[in-house]
Every structure is written in structure tokens, then in C-alpha cells.
Amino acid sequence: MLYLLYAFLATAAVVVSGVVALHPRLAALNHRYVIAVASGIVISAAFLELLPESNIESNAIYVALGFFTFYVIEKAMMLHACDEEECESHTMSLAAVVGMASDNIVDGVGIAIAYLTNPALGLAVTIAVVVHEVPQGMASTSLMRHAGYSVKKTFTVIAIAGLTYPVGAYISQFIPQNIYIAIIAFIAGDFIYIGAGDLLHEAHRRLSYKVVIATLLGAAFFIVVESLI
């Protein structure tokens, strides 16, 4: 079950990015370029891999459902990537922690279903999940530290949230194969919202040509990777 290993790679991305954000100097760095690169990769994964596999003519409703589901979750729980300065204006509530874990479970299911549909698609989805979890993991850590969480409590929350990826991947074993394509369509909508509605929007809070270049580099990176897998 290689997809479980892929899910644990996402876990590692969350934990490592969280640990990095605990370092005072690294936490103070501008995360905007990391967010921009991640947005380019996630959007490219949605358009170049997930949508072509989703039988869009029949499953467009699931793409829309994925998009608006994560729009509602993000707006209700204020769970999104942000840089150090902007994270100071947000809070990390229990609802946000639950939202982060729920999002990770969905991504874990997406990794597994994509892999079971096509191993190359599973790898592409894993890459997109890993890169979008880096800025989110850093943001979540910053939010918890600003909320007064101890280092131990912050790390515990990040670790538990990260472990929900393999939980989602395991759950995929019980999902009927005849709805795999609908789930891929749902994940495509999820990625479009995360990439364009969350990450790209956050990266462009202060317009900079460097952010534009970072976004395009992220897209170019994914295109190169896609051609190799």
C-alpha cells in the first residue's frame, strides 16, 4: 500500500514545517514566496492532472462541491496560510484545529484514491498536498504560538493533525471503486479553491513581481515533474 507511504510524506511535511516555524529566525522570514510557489503547484495539479481524470462532463457538480465545501470551511474556521505578520491578527481555536484535521483526512483520502486510480496521479496529488501543507503548517504553528500555546502543545497538535493523513488514506479502503472519479473531481475543486482562493490570494496581499515569478516557477516545476512521472 504505497499510498500510505505517500500519506506519511504529507505528515512529515506538516511536522517539519511546524518545527521550522518554531525557530524564531525562520518564523520571522517572509513566507509569501513559499505560499506563491505552493499556489502554482496546487493550481497546476488541479488543472493538469485532476480535472482531466475527473470526467468533467459528468462530474462537474463534484468539482463545484469540492470548491465551495472548502470555501465554507476556510471562512468558518479562518484556517489558511498566512505570513508571520498577518498570523498575528488571527487566532487558533478548537474549531480551526478540527478543521485542519478534517482537511487533512480529505487530502489523505484524495492521495489514496488518486493512487488507486493511477499511481502517477497519486504521486502528483501527493506532491501538491505536501507543498500546500508547508505554508499551512507554518501558519498553524505561528497561530498557536501567538495564542499562547507552549512549544510542546503546539508540536503535539501539529503531529496529531499530520497523522490524520494516513487515517484518510486508510479510510479509502472502504470507499467503493465506482465513486473514485467523483472523489477525484471533488479533490480537484478542493485544490482549485486552496490554490487560487486561499494560497494565491494570500500571496498577493501585497502585490510584487517576485510573487508572480514565484507562482509561475511553482507551476513550471509541476509541469516538469508531470512530464517525468
Image (cartoon, grey):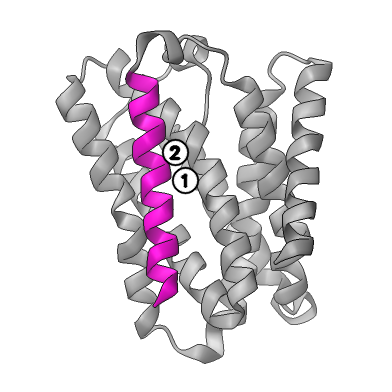
Label 2, secondary structure: give it.
Answer: helix
Residue 136, position as x, y percentages in the image: 47, 35
Calculate the distance from the C-alpha at mark 2 to the C-alpha at mark 1.
5 Å
Q: Position of residue 228 (x, y in %)?
A: 74, 63
Q: Is residue 10 magenta?
A: yes
Which numbered tag is attached to residue 76? 2
Q: At numbered mark 1, what does the secondary structure look like: helix, strand or loop? A: helix
Q: Are marks 2 and 1 in contact (CB under 8 Å)?
A: yes
Q: Main secondary structure of the magenta part?
A: helix
Look at the image and say whether residue 11 sits in the magenta stretch.
yes
Q: Quadrant of residue 38?
A: top right
For label 1, the crowd category at 10 Å Cα-Cα, with few meaning under 14, some 14 to 19 and many 20 or more, is some
Callout 1, which amino acid? Ile
- Start-end of magenta stretch: 1-22
Q: Position of residue 157 (x, y in %)?
A: 23, 37
Viewer can see residue 105: no
Provide the residue designation for mark 1: 73
> Quick one: quadrant of the N terminus?
bottom left
The residue positioned 70% from the left and 75% from the top of the image is 54
**Residue 100: x percent and y percent?**
37, 44
Horizontal side of 194 relative to 175 (left or right) equals right
Q: Report crowding for label 2: few under 14, some 14 to 19, many 20 or more residues within 10 A (C-alpha).
A: few
